[in-house]
Image (spheres, rainbow, N blue to C red):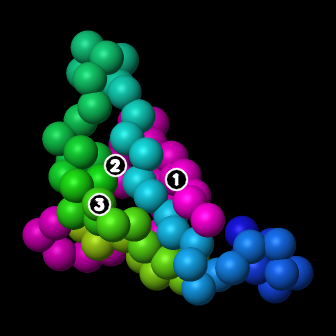
Amino acid sequence: WGEAGDEGLIDPGTARRYWSVGKSARAGGRACDVCTRIAQHNRAGVGLDEPFKIPGGGDTFLPPAHPGCRCGVTMRF
């Protein structure tokens, strides 16, 4: 995404990344509470160079947020 911005293919000033919650087979096909909270806490998305804030402190740029995490990141331009 950084390269696409550098080449003018996307506008880095308006592009937003969103935490996309995956479903865990271990949790019976449900999203885990950890990732659901991260997605809700970052509901407005984050910029290309911004980390996702983790409720309770800390941050991360990409999943995984925990062992067995099946989440991903989506973009809106």
Question: Mark 2 is on which residue type?
Answer: His
Element marked by disc 3: loop
Disc 1: which residue: 73
Question: Magenta span covers which residues?
Answer: 55-77
Kind of residue at badge 1:
Val
- Nearer the camera: disc 3 or disc 1: 3
Q: Nearer the viewer, mark 2 or mark 1?
A: 1
- Is residue 64 visible in the rendered image? The answer is no
- The image quadrant where one finds the C terminus is bottom right
Q: Which mark is residue 66?
A: 2
Q: Is 25 drawn above or below residue 50 in the view shown? A: above
Q: Is residue 48 left or right of residue 10?
A: left
The reply, left or right, for residue 64 in relation to residue 41 is: right
Query: Residue furthest toward the left?
Result: 56
Q: Position of residue 49 (x, y in %)?
A: 55, 82
Give the residue at x 35% y 25%: 24
Q: Position of residue 69 (x, y in %)?
A: 40, 40
